[in-house]
Image: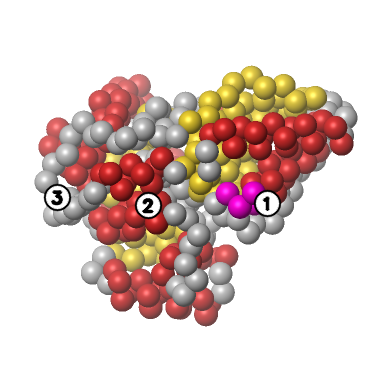
């Protein structure tokens, strides 16, 4: 069995890579399983895999390191229920110190498994952090991002199709200068050749016992996580042409988030379990849905931004009121959770 761990900051493209890889490998006849992970409980990504009948489990209410037994139980369940050959396990984007707290315990307690670790990074966030224009994220949040890159053996720079060739050349030079000792991949996940290069690389790099555990300040790490607010919400949009109302609501939430100056880790929506819409920064275009007649839509929202739970709850309610007052739609809330992550307390930490 192969276990491919994915780390990387919120919105770095981990889920998209897993989804594309799973589809490709399933078509090739392999048995694939997916384990998603989040601090929350109502997850867009798990809903997407479930809807597409890709065998999947989830570790909720905290990262893999703080819920290691849940991770291991889910690995065992995928083996027993689906006889999987390959498992992709995606750690929550606010987590680091994966080598010491997840990878090394897996190597010790599942010695026959081949384990790889890929660290994903959105090229646009790298531009801000490594370039002349500094990111506006708080330094404690950037500490997590930088530690993720530091502990990586393989760094996958994603979304390269969204920047110019000249800008990509500059990033490649900077990455070679700072991380030249690591395996560096530059990836457009929707390109099959690019995706295959990543899959071939992780298959060839499962001897990960040589990766070093981080020297890490857990107080700074915890501070960075605590500056991020989580909101998970499920609701129903009803009325004539409900998909149009859903598009209005999605864009209203995004534009209000940007207007308030809240830095977006990720902002994900899942529409009727099928269509996923994502915003992973503060400078994206508005979402456009495929509109067709429908009287009711179930909408799932995962929001992770640099703010407070109270502020983003207020923002969502204001967005809903705006849509209800300007258009003839009814918005019904089903579930909601808003919080900030607690102090990270890993079950294992191996040097």
Q: Secondary structure at mark 1?
A: helix
Indicate whether 13 appears above or below 109.
Answer: below
- Tell me: 281 left or right of 23: right
Residue 247 picture quarter = top right
Q: Which residue is mark 2?
A: 140
Quarter of the rendering occupied by the N terminus = top left
Q: Residues within 10 Å of mark 2 (few under 14, many from 20)?
A: some
N-terminal-most mark, 1 or 3: 3
Q: Which residue is mark 1?
A: 259
Percent across and percent down for residue 262 are 58, 49
Q: Secondary structure at mark 3?
A: loop
Q: Residues within 10 Å of mark 1 (few under 14, many from 20)?
A: few
How much space separates mark 2 and mark 1, taking CA atoms?
23 Å
Label of residue 306 in the image: none
Colour basis: secondary structure
Indicate whether 313 appears above or below 280.
Answer: above
Indicate whether 97 appears above or below 42.
Answer: below
How much space separates mark 1 and mark 3, taking CA atoms?
46 Å
Q: Nearer the viewer, residue 243 or 60?
A: 60
N-terminal-most mark, 3 or 2: 2
**Magenta stretch, residue numbers:** 258-262
Label of residue 209 in the image: 3
Residue at 42% x, 62% y is 157
Percent across and percent down for residue 273 are 61, 30
How much space separates mark 3 and mark 2, taking CA atoms?
29 Å
- Mark 3 or 2: the one toward you: 2
């Amino acid at each position: 069995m192969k276990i491919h761990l994915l780390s990387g900051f919120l919105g770095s493209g981990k889920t998209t890579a897993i989804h594309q890889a799973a589809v490709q490998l399933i078509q090739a006849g392999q048995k694939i399983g997916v384990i998603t992970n989040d601090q929350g409980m109502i997850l867009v990504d798990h809903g997407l895999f479930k809807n597409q009948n890709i065998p999947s489990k989830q570790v909720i209410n905290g990262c893999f390191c703080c819920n290691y037994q849940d991770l291991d139980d889910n690995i065992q369940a995928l083996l027993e229920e689906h006889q999987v050959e390959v498992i992709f396990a995606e750690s929550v984007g606010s987590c680091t110190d994966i080598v010491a707290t997840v990878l090394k315990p897996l190597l010790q307690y599942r010695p026959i498994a081949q384990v790889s670790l890929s660290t994903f990074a959105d090229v646009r966030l790298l531009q801000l952090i490594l370039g002349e224009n500094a990111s506006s994220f708080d330094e404690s949040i950037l500490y997590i991002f930088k530690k993720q890159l530091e502990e990586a053996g393989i760094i996958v720079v994603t979304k390269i199709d969204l920047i110019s060739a000249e800008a990509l050349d500059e990033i490649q030079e900077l990455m070679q200068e700072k991380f030249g000792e690591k395996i560096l991949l530059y990836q457009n996940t929707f390109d099959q050749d690019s995706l295959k290069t990543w899959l071939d690389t992780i298959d060839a790099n499962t001897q990960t016992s040589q990766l070093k555990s981080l020297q890490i300040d857990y107080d700074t790490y915890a501070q960075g996580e605590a500056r991020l607010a989580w909101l998970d919400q499920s609701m129903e949009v009803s009325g004539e042409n409900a998909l149009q109302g859903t598009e209005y609501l999605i864009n209203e939430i995004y534009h209000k988030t940007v207007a308030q100056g809240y830095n977006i880790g990720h902002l994900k929506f899942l529409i009727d379990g099928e269509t996923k819409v994502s915003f992973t920064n503060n400078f994206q275009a508005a979402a456009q849905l495929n509109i067709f007649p429908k009287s009711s839509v179930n909408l799932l929202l995962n929001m992770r931004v640099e703010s407070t739970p109270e502020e983003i709850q207020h923002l969502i309610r204001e967005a809903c009121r705006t849509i209800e007052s300007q258009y003839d739609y009814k918005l019904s809330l089903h579930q909601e959770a808003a919080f900030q992550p607690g102090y990270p307390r890993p079950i294992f930490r191996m040097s």
